[in-house]
Image (cartoon, helix red, strand yellow):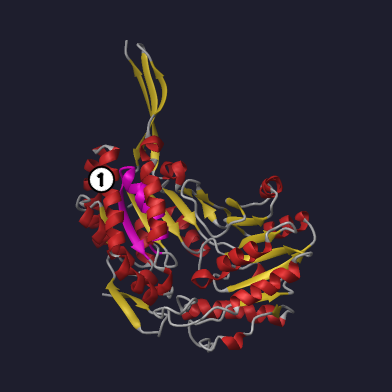
Amino acid sequence: MSKLTCISPIDGSVYAERELQSVDDIKAIVGKARIAQKSWAKLNIKARVKIVEAAIHALEAMNDEIIPELAHMMGRPIRYGGEIGGVKERALHMTSIAEVSLAPTIIEQSDAFERYIAREALGVVLVIAPWNYPFLTAVNAIIPSLVAGNAVILKHSTQSILAGARFTKAFEQAGLPENLFANIFMNHATSGELIAARTFDFINFTGSVGGGKQIERAAAGTFVGVGLELGGKDPGYVRADADIDSAVETLIDGAMFNSGQCCCGIERIYVDESVFDEFVAKAKAIVEGYTLGNPLDETTTLGPMAAVRFADEVRAQISEAIADGATSIIDRTRFTKDTGKDAYLAPEILIDVTHDMRIMHDESFGPVVGIMKVSSDAEAIKLMNDSEFGLTASIWTKDSEAATEIGGQIETGTIFMNRCDYLDPALCWTGCKNTGRGISLSAFGYQSVTRAKSYHLKKA
């Protein structure tokens, strides 16, 4: 039987392998999940929350083991401590609002009628999770799905192949009923066949635009809902009145953290012409202070990208931009680990860029950012909207009214003021255009994994 193989970006060696499961294997797993889900949905919400929260704490207890696994699988430096802080923030917020979010909407309670709208579990939810934040992204869908009374089938990226087993162990330790959660290993052909056969009741996918299109095509005609968080090219806009030091520090971190491999990372920055030179000089100083190296080394601040092919795509975008007139401001000779032949890629800042360059409109998903000079809010708005994507946008200003006015004109799912590259679990996580469709987290996140059911009860 064929295998899924995780190649470590640290040295190109095979880090982990798992046997692929067949269509019949997975259908059998889903069948057991359906049986388990019926009983699970009958439990009260407090009982479900208690088990789910215990699983999150069990996952936290594994964090010292998970951190080096992440470094081996996708290259994030161990100095950053993994993802458990964000996992807890998101998961525990969702459990804290569960009773209110899932409560029936009461229309009438009288001697004559009882009318209300209930939220009922969908059944079996398939979560297809990405490698860049294998725990944070998966939690967005797993936790509300289970708390709402669904069973969950998790299919993780090959690049983060061990993450699913950690979830499995955590749920076992928490006492989650058997067969209610399953970690599976399947290829694209198998997943497409299963989705087309209406094996699942909802599909949550985080990944590429191409992957999202494949899922939509497979699900066509099944009337099964899909939640898709796809590509991004998130912009930052620095107005003349911004706190420049804060803007530079936060936006550059938002562009470079995790080697730029963040769903809502900053990929393009527009700076008012009056503060452009100051911003660029300070950005250069920050980036040239990074240490590119082995992520298992505590001194490393920037690890390799998750795969050589990802690094090669970013190298191509940078080379094309420079050939077309962009200027690199980074002394790349400071980063000797970048040989141009593996997953280690020196961070890059480009100026003199235009929207004719791929670096300013294609998703890069790497440690590179283009910075453009603008002369007005109107120009910045036009450039920020000149993208096929719409996940987040970051505005830097001391004027909240201006930020609100600008934000209302930007085609995106989230507007930040004086912040970026963050996911607030109390707010809905959503996007527009080619970033996809659907909502996760917040009270709205529970609507994606439940269906409305109306009750009209005449008493006399």
Classify residue 385 by image quadrant.
Answer: bottom right
Question: Residue 173: x percent and y percent?
Answer: 21, 56
Please tell me whether residue 155 belongs to the stretch shown in magenta: yes
User: Who is closer to the viewer here, 29 or 37?
Assistant: 37
The quadrant the N terminus occupies is bottom left
**Magenta span:** 134-156
Question: Residue 49: x percent and y percent?
Answer: 30, 44
User: Who is closer to the viewer here, 317 or 428?
Assistant: 428
Query: Is residue 87 toward the left or the right of residue 401 in the image?
Result: left
Residue lying at 68% horizontally and 77% vertically, measured from the top left:
321
Please tell me whether residue 403 belongs to the stretch shown in magenta: no
Tell me which amino acid carries mark 1. Answer: Gln
Classify residue 370 by image quadrant.
Answer: bottom right
Query: Is residue 459 toward the left or the right of residue 130 in the image?
Result: left
Classify residue 163 by image quadrant.
Answer: bottom left
**Residue 44 against residue 248 in the figure, above or below:** above
Residue lying at 77% horizontally and 54% vertically, measured from the top left:
378
Badge 1: few (under 14), some or many (20 or more) residues near its Cα, within 10 Å? many
The residue tagged with tag 1: helix, strand or loop?
helix
